[in-house]
Amino acid sequence: MRACLEPPNHIVLARRLQDCLRWRNANVRPPDVLAAQRRERDKVRRKRQQRWSRPRPKAA
């Protein structure tokens, strides 16, 4: 299994990296979509923190 992940030489490694970068550049997401996803993840994390954290002490 591991042998297929290791390229046999530097030329093959360079080609795989170039293919990966070419795919990534062709399939880039717009910055506004990335920002919306980031906001949604932050919202979920805040909810999870409120649900599972210790109860806040009440002010005296």
Image (spheres, grey):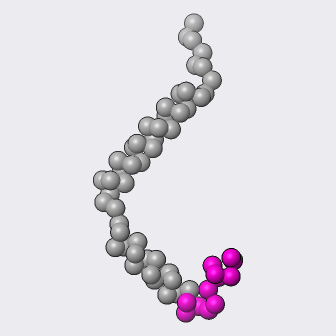
Q: Please identify the quarter of the rendering in which residue 26 is found.
A: bottom left
User: At 32% from the left edge and 53% from the top edge, which residue is drawn?
Assistant: 33
User: Which quadrant is the C terminus positioned in?
Assistant: top right
The x, y position of residue 35, in whole percent, is: 36, 50
Taking the view exactly as shown, the residue that stands out farthest to the front is: 1
59 lies above or below 32: above
User: At 41% from the left edge and 48% from the top edge, which residue is drawn?
Assistant: 38
User: Which quadrant is the N terminus positioned in?
Assistant: bottom right
17 lies above or below 45: below
15 lies above or below 5: below
Taking the view exactly as shown, the residue that stands out farthest to the right is: 2
Q: How many marks?
A: 0
Residue 7 located left or right of residue 27: right
The x, y position of residue 50, in whole percent, is: 53, 27
User: At 30% from the left edge and 53% from the top edge, which residue is drawn?
Assistant: 32
User: At 56% from the left edge and 86% from the top edge, which residue is drawn?
Assistant: 13
Magenta region: 1-12
Taking the view exactly as shown, the residue that stands out farthest to the top is: 60
Residue 57 located left or right of residue 18: right
The x, y position of residue 9, in whole percent, is: 62, 92
The x, y position of residue 7, in whole percent, is: 61, 86
Q: Please identify the quarter of the rendering in which residue 34 is found.
A: bottom left
